[in-house]
Every structure is written in C-alpha cells, then in structure tokens.
Amino acid sequence: MNKPFVRSTTDKYIAGVCGGLAAYFGVDATIIRIVMVLIALFVQPFGWMLYPVLWLLMPTDVGGPSGLNQLLGWLKQGGAERR
C-alpha cells in the first residue's frame, strides 16, 4: 500500500508539512517537528529552506493544491489588493 506524500490539514501549526511527514513515516508529529528544528539549526544554510520547499511541493491531504499552486493562483488573481 502506497501512502501519499501530502501535507496535513488537521495536524498542523503552520502549513501541515510536519503533520504530513509524520503520517507518511508513521511517527508522532512532535518528533518530526523537533527534527525539523534541529535540521534548521545545524544544517546551514539549507536547513531553514527545507520547510518552505516541502510546502511548495506537497499537496494537501484532502486533494487540495500544493503550496506552489496556491501561490501561482494568488498571483494570477492579482495578489494583494492594489490601491
């Protein structure tokens, strides 16, 4: 059985990346969050870029768009309201 590599919409603090990774690997989300913080601190300069890259690539678990598709859709609509 193949598990999907997706972001969580229920187990999230920011974008659901750690919750999705925890579901994919079958571990507690707190462990993934601690590991992500440690990677961000000790694997410089690429550690802090890991979370945004995963957000851009991973779709949501309810069939929603990836972060990149969300960002492109927002830009197509004109971004923030222009004054």
Image (spheres, rainbow, N blue to C red):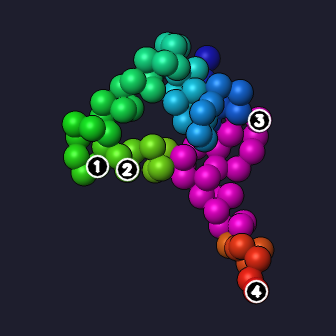
Question: In 3D space, how far apart are the residues under numbered discs 4 and 1 (Cα atoms)?
Answer: 37 Å
Category of crowding for the residue at label 2, using alpha-carbon neighbours closer than 10 angstroms: few (below 14), some (14–19), many (at least 20): few
Question: In 3D space, how far apart are the residues under numbered discs 2 and 4 (Cα atoms)?
Answer: 32 Å
Please tell me whether mark 3 or mark 4 is closer to you in this view. 4
Which of the two labelled residues, at mark 3 and mark 4, occupies the earlier sequence position?
Answer: 3
User: On the rendered structure, is 49 left or right of 64?
Assistant: left
Give the labeled residue for mark 4. 83
Tell me where residue 78 sits by quadrant: bottom right
User: On the rendered structure, is 40 left or right of 62?
Assistant: left
Which of the two labelled residues, at mark 4 and mark 1, occupies the earlier sequence position?
Answer: 1
Check whether the beta carbons of the residues at disc 2 and disc 1 lie within 8 A of each other.
Answer: yes
Residue at the farthest front position: 83
Please tell me whether mark 3 or mark 2 is closer to you in this view. 2
The location of residue 7, given as percent across then percent down, is: 62, 36
Q: Which label was assigned to residue 46?
A: 1
Q: Quadrant of the N terminus?
A: top right
* Badge 2 element: helix
Which of the two labelled residues, at mark 3 and mark 2, occupies the earlier sequence position?
Answer: 2
Give the labeled residue for mark 2. 49
Q: Is residue 82 visible?
A: yes
Please tell me whether mark 4 or mark 1 is closer to you in this view. 4
User: On the rendered structure, is 14 left or right of 35?
Assistant: right
The location of residue 56, given as percent across then percent down, is: 54, 52
Which of the two labelled residues, at mark 1 and mark 3, occupies the earlier sequence position?
Answer: 1
